[in-house]
Image: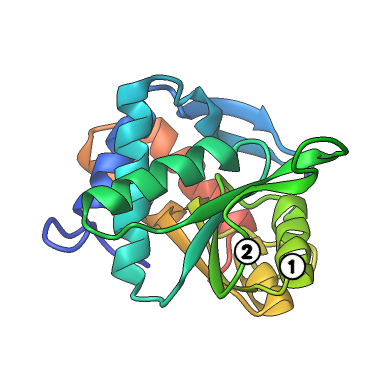
Amino acid sequence: MTGTLNANKSDYKAAFLKLALQHGVLKFGEFKLKSGRISPYFFNLGLISSGGALHALGRAYAQALTASGIAYDMLFGPAYKGIPLVAAVSIALAHDGRDVPYAYNRKEAKNHGEGGTIVGAAPQGRVVIVDDVLTAGTALRESVALLRASGAQPVAAVIALDRQEQGPGGRSAVAEMAQENNLKIIALVSVREMLDFLAQENVGAATLDAIRSYQARYGVN
C-alpha cells in the first residue's frame, strides 16, 4: 500500500483521511507514544462521535474490506472501540447488498440473562476483526483467542492506520501481528499514503518534514 492515492482505486482512502482531518482524528504536534517515542502526529479514532461521521467511517471500512477480496462469514468488534465500528461496518455492508452477522465482547462476563462475554451472533466460520488502530496488539490477541476458543476461525483484521513503524523485533506491529496470529491485516491507509494525501492537501512543509524525519528514523522499509 504505497504510492500516490489513485482516484479510481482509493476513493475510500481519501474520503477517510478527509474525515480524519475534519474531525481532529489526525493531529500534528509532539505526542509521546506508549513506546516512549515522540511522534509528530497522533491518530485518535475515538473523536468520530456523530452519526454522520460514523456512517462515513463505516463506509470506508466496508469498502476497504471489500477491496481486500478476503472471504469471510461474519465480523467481530473488540470492546470497546470495536463495538460501534463493527456495527457501522455491518450496516454499510448491508447497504451494499451483503447482510453479515456480527458480534462483540464484554470486558467482564455477565452472570445473568444470556451470560458470557460475547454479544450478538455466535462466532462461527471465517471471522474478520474490526478495530481502530494496532499499537500493542492486546485487543487483537484477546479477540483471536476468544474467537478460536469459540470454534471460529479469525482470518483478518481491519484497522484504520498502519503506522509502518518498527516494533521491538525490528518489524512493524502489523507485520508482527499478522505472522504471530496467522491473520491478514487490512489497513484503510498507511502512513506513506497519509503523507501523499497531506502533500496534496497543502499541509505545511514543516509538518510533512517532521513526519518524514520520524519515519526515516523509526519506519520500516
Considering depth in this image, is 25 or 61 the residue closer to the camera? Answer: 61
Counting from the top left corner in percent of width and height, residue 69 is at 33, 75
**Which residue is under mark 1?**
150
Residue 201, position in %: x, y? 23, 35
Q: Position of 97 compared to 133: left or right?
A: left
> What's the distance in space between the residues labelled 2 and 1, CA to CA?
6 Å
- In this rendering, the answer to whether 131 lies above or below 169 is above
Which residue bears the numbered disc 2? Answer: 123
Seen in the picture, residue 16 relative to 31 is either above or below; the reply is below
Vertical side of 115 occupied by 20: above or below: above
Label 2 neighbourhood size at 10 Å, few (<14), some (14-19), many (20+)? many
Q: Position of residue 190 (x, y in %)?
A: 43, 56
Mark 1: which amino acid? Answer: Ser
Q: Dividing the image into 4 quarters, which one contains the N terminus?
A: bottom left
Residue 172 location, quadrant:
bottom right
Q: Report if residue 10 is visible in the image.
A: yes
Q: With 79 as the anchor, is 21 left or right in this view?
A: left
Q: Amino acid at mark 2?
A: Pro
State if disc 1 and disc 2 touch (CB < 8 Å).
yes
Q: In the picture, residue 142 is in which quadrant?
A: bottom right
Residue drawn at x 29%, y 67% as measured from the top left: 67
At 30% across and 45% down in the image, what residue appears?
59
Tell me if I can see residue 195 in this picture: no
